[in-house]
Image (spheres, grey):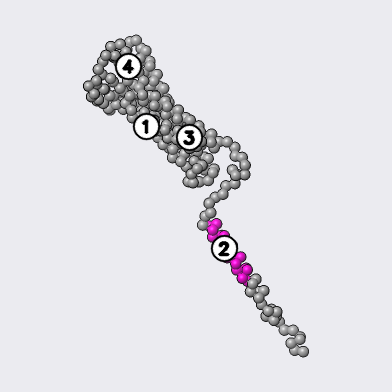
Amino acid sequence: MQIFGFVLALLGIMGAMVATLLPNWKVSADVGSNIITAISQMQGLWMDCTWYSTGMFSCTLKYSVLSLPAYLQTARTTMVLCCVMAAMGLCLASLGLKCTRWGGGRRSKRHAAIASGGCFVAAGFLCLVPASWFTNEVITNFLDSSVPESNKFEPGGAVYVAFVSAGFLFVGGSIFCMSCSGKRHGPQDLILLPPPDKLLLQQQQQQQQQQLLQQELQHQYCSLSPLDNKTGYSLQDYV
């Protein structure tokens, strides 16, 4: 389940990055006289593009940030934060996976997995907010009768990619949070076997040397003759 959640989160961050860079957050609507037009316009977070029927394609970057509407500035900020949070979640998830050897003991892995799940859920929320707000602004502008038909747009493919990426991040984060949030059962979860270190190996070697020394002393003592064991004089030696 953790590997499945990691794959979903990876797809989510890839989709969020692609949606952030795509220029087709909204495209010109084919309504009224726009049906027979030879120009197709697209607008994204960072540039506006125009496609001509002759095959030419030109884009213009949005250099001025303060001249942009509030929803577009918010979409830029939140999508960048979404990518950053998702990248942090991937780093923590690689440490919290139970199938990996790095990341410390079981307790530290559990904490890393829960933290990565929180990062993925936060990244999904940051990706969902701009997509929803951007879609609402586009639909509101489209339904406004005072807006001319040449200035009406509809949601583009980047918005749908953002929605799908947010869903992937939500599901992946939920899997990581639920995989380590339950109570521990059984003796295997209560016993933590740390890897042997140098100090433990030295202690074991010292114990083995002491045992060998004791065995040698006992062997030497048992091999002595009864005459060698006498340490004093007896009366029989003089009688």
- Dot 2 surroundings within 10 Å: few (below 14), some, or many (20 or more)? few
Looking at the image, tell me whether mark 2 or mark 1 is earlier in sequence order.
Answer: 1
Residue 232 visible? yes
In the rendered image, residue 179 lying in the magenta stretch gets the answer: no
- Three-letter code, disc 4: Ala
Distance, label 2 to label 1, CA atoms, is 58 Å
Q: What residue does disc 4 label?
A: 29
2 or 3: tag closer to the N-terminus: 3
Q: Is residue 211 a member of the stretch shown in magenta?
A: yes
In the image, residue 141 lies at what x, y percent?
35, 15
Q: Which mark is residue 206?
A: 2
Q: Is residue 179 shown above or below 214?
A: above
Mark nearer the viewer, 1 or 4: 4
Name the residue at 62% across, 44% down. 187
Q: Residue furthest front?
A: 54
Occupied quadrant, residue 51: top left
Q: Secondary structure at mark 2?
A: helix
The quarter of the picture where the C terminus appears is bottom right
State the residue in front, 126 or 97: 97
Disc with the residue nearer the chain's start (1 vs 4) = 1
Is residue 86 something that shows in the picture? no
First reached walking from the N terminus: tag 3 or tag 1: 3
In this view, 235 is above or below 49: below
Magenta region: which residues? 199-217
- Within 10 Å of disc 4 (Cα), the crowding (few <14, some 14-19, many 20+) is many
Dot in front, 2 or 3: 3
Which amino acid type is shown beneath numbered disc 3? Gly
Pick whichever of labels 4 and 3 is earlier in the sequence: 3
Helix, strand or loop at mark 4? loop
Does 75 sit left or right of 230 as displayed?
A: left
Residue at left offset 52%, top offset 55%: 197
